[in-house]
Image: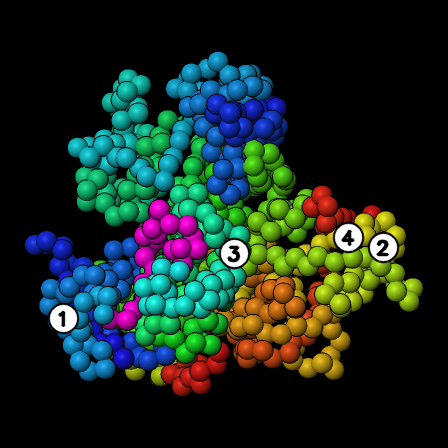
Amino acid sequence: MAKITIDNFVKNYGDVKAVKGVSFEIGDGEFVALLGPSGCGKSSTMRSISGLEEITSGTISFDGKSVNDVRPRDRNVAMAFETYALYPTLNVYENIAFPLRSAKWPNEKVDEKVLDIAHRMELEPILNNMPAELSGGQAQRAGLARALVRAPSVFLLDEPISHLDTRQRYRMRQFIKHIHMEMGYTMIYVTHDQEEAMALADRIVVMHEGIIRQVGTPDEVYNDPEDDFVAGFVGEPPMNFIEGSIAKVDGKWVFQAKGQTVVLPEHWQSYGQKMPAQVKLGIRPFYIDVTLDPQQPYDLQGEVFLSENLQDNCTVSLDIDDLRLAVVTTPAFRPARHEKIYLKFNPAYIRFFDLQTGKAIRPQ
Amino acid sequence: MIELRNVSKMYGQSTIALRNLNLEIRDQEFFVIYGPAGAGKSTTLRLIAGISQPTKGDILRDGVSILKVAPENRNMAMAFENYALYSHMSVYENLAFPLKASKYSKQEIEEQVQRVARILQISDLLDRRPGFLSGGQRQRVSLGRAIVRPSSLYLLDEPIGHLDAKLRHRMRAELKAMAVDMNATVALVTTASREALALGDRIAILRDGILEQVGTPEEIYSLPQNEFVASFVGEPPMSFLDVEPVQGDGRAALHIHGSDVHLPISPRVAQNLNGGKTGYRLGVRPNELSITSQHDEQHHTPGSVDVIEPLGYCNIISVRVGDGTIRVVVDPTTRPEVKETVWLSMDGENIHLFHNEKAVVHPVGNKKITLNNNH
């Protein structure tokens, strides 16, 4: 196990700047997710930590010692990929034993170690099976077991479950979290799927176009995003954004957009003076109450575009002029197309971002 | 109406893509074909389109076989999974192509192309060639080409599967609204549970070339006919526990494997347990349960917290109960400790019960619902 320090790390491929100088730390035994859309630099970062790629500049250290010049196999890093190429001519036992035999472990120690990991990973019933006889999930577990059998200092996972179906993904998520809890490895998990990152990681590094947008716990990244990119990328359905301006009307600070006015919540009032004039209001689809009754107090009004009944909830899409918003409501509430609908924001969950810079504005 | 009657499809001598499939797609219906990889979903669409011929069985439109009708004469529009765009044409020309083929006037072509481009948010890409587009952009052009011209049937093979979350949500709603406004008949293939539920008037669930169930979203979700459908529809997926029917103190109960929990069951449930002692599993949806830290009247099934997954708007708690795991969706402020004992609101009434994978009991409130088409 190891603490990993990434210091001003740069990775170029020819003229393409994949990672533009990032710094962060991964604690000993910590589970960190590198999250971002394709091309954000997350895989380059992971491959550089593993040593599979040479870095352009900066330092990567394990436990305070630079590994820039350490060969991949001497870094004691285990990697798991989406596809697990098991050796087809070896049974599950021998597949798991393979890295130990290559390292010239004596037979009885190999046996002890293989049986131990097989027990932890619920592989005992299939140790004698050949890879061709395994289900997809079993093959994946066997592949993980082989990656883990040498007790690596760092365990790297690159989109290991992105192509599984929903049921398998939930099962594997639980399983990977178990490995972390029981074995305490330092783990780095690369994914473009924000839900996986949220569900699994102690902390999330959100990347975009080669830079870090935020490093934080799932709670911080979700509830206190640094900027509008993080806010929009984390959470599904994605956060609603409304561009508008801040003004003082009748002694109250308000947000104005699309010809409508939202009075700022109480805790923002004393901060109104310091807000930029042009802002983006952000609010998640879960934190808007909707009603068809104009007599109820409301912040904004719109027109229903479509109600989608997902059985456990209903997602209402609605339009305010040319702006489309989404609201998650109870399955019983299913307004018809083109009905007038009234929105009330939960004040605790309103976020503001500077329209120019995208940076979060936080009332002090 | 399109009917598939006893349709089978073999590839080569041994690969069976579809086995004796019977389906009907009604006029003006949004029909979703849902299932895992290799289920035969795309094969079904290709057979309807006429790109591929069934090995056995018949395909009819309004009661008349169309097997001998060439694909181009079936008046169907298809969006392919691999997009199949014309690489030497601009996006505009790709979208205009079906209209030109049907001899639309220049002005009509311009109007329709611009309309579809606006809905799909590709208006600024019209001059580009497909080679200069991202996967998500190409997918929208492919979808646009399928819907630009009125058609008796739209066949859409995972038309929004490669879009990012934001666009996928938006396009899902656009697609549904368009179908409703145009009274269109649509058959759409997907591998996403939420997409199937959101879009379908009816959903057919396929696995390994076999139709597992067909019904409204409500029916599929509330009254799954077997464990596969139950586990494959809804997210987070339903949890299952092995149980054994027992008689104790003169009252029927379900014993949860690996625990000393006995869930008392009513005569309504008990009368459906005619299959002996083995092969029973109960199923519960994670969003239909709650947990407490103290035993109370509602929460009397103990379990041990295994994994906590914070998703921001909720937490998913996996709880070990006997040999199995039950997932519960709780609000984000509920954060029990790992290994802590919690109490689940699980009883013998509000459960699905399966025997050898077939559903034998559904929760008491889950009655067959007649739908008034509520768009």
The disc at residue B123 is 3
Q: What is the distance, in whole Å, between disc 3 and disc 1 at their CAs?
A: 39 Å
| Dot 1: chain letter | B
Mark nearer the viewer, 3 or 2: 3
Mark 3: amino acid: Ser
Q: Are marks 1 and 4 on the same chain?
A: no
The residues bearing labels 4 and 3 have C-alpha atoms spaced at a distance of: 27 Å
Residue highlighted by disc 1: B68
Q: Is A134 displayed left or right of B302 in the figure?
A: left
- Disc 3 crowd rating (10 Å Cα; few below 14, some 14-19, many 20+) is some
Examine the image and state in which quarter residue B190 appears: bottom left
Looking at this view, is A73 or A323 the one in front? A323
Q: Position of residue B228 (x, y in %)?
A: 30, 64
State which quadrant residue B200 falls in. bottom left
Q: Is residue B170 above or below residue A361?
A: below
Q: Secondary structure at mark 3?
A: helix
Give residue B315's position: percent from left, percent from top. Answer: 55, 56
Q: Which mark is residue A272?
A: 2
Query: In the rendered image, is residue A270 in sight?
Result: yes
Q: Residue at x 17, y 32 (%)?
A: A89
Kindly identify which residue carries mark 4.
A278
Compute the Cα span from label 1 to label 2.
71 Å
Say which of B134 and B231 sits in front.
Answer: B134
Q: Is residue B5 magenta?
A: no
Asked whether the beta carbons under mark 1 and mark 2 sit within 8 Å of each other, the answer is no
Span shown in magenta: B74-95
Give the image location of residue B167, x and y in percent.
51, 56
Query: Mark 2 or 4 closer to N-term?
Result: 2
Calculate the distance from the C-alpha at mark 2 to the C-alpha at mark 4: 12 Å
Lower position in the chain sequence, tag 3 or tag 1: 1
Q: Would you say B341 lies left or right of B214 here?
A: right
Q: Amino acid at mark 2?
A: Gly
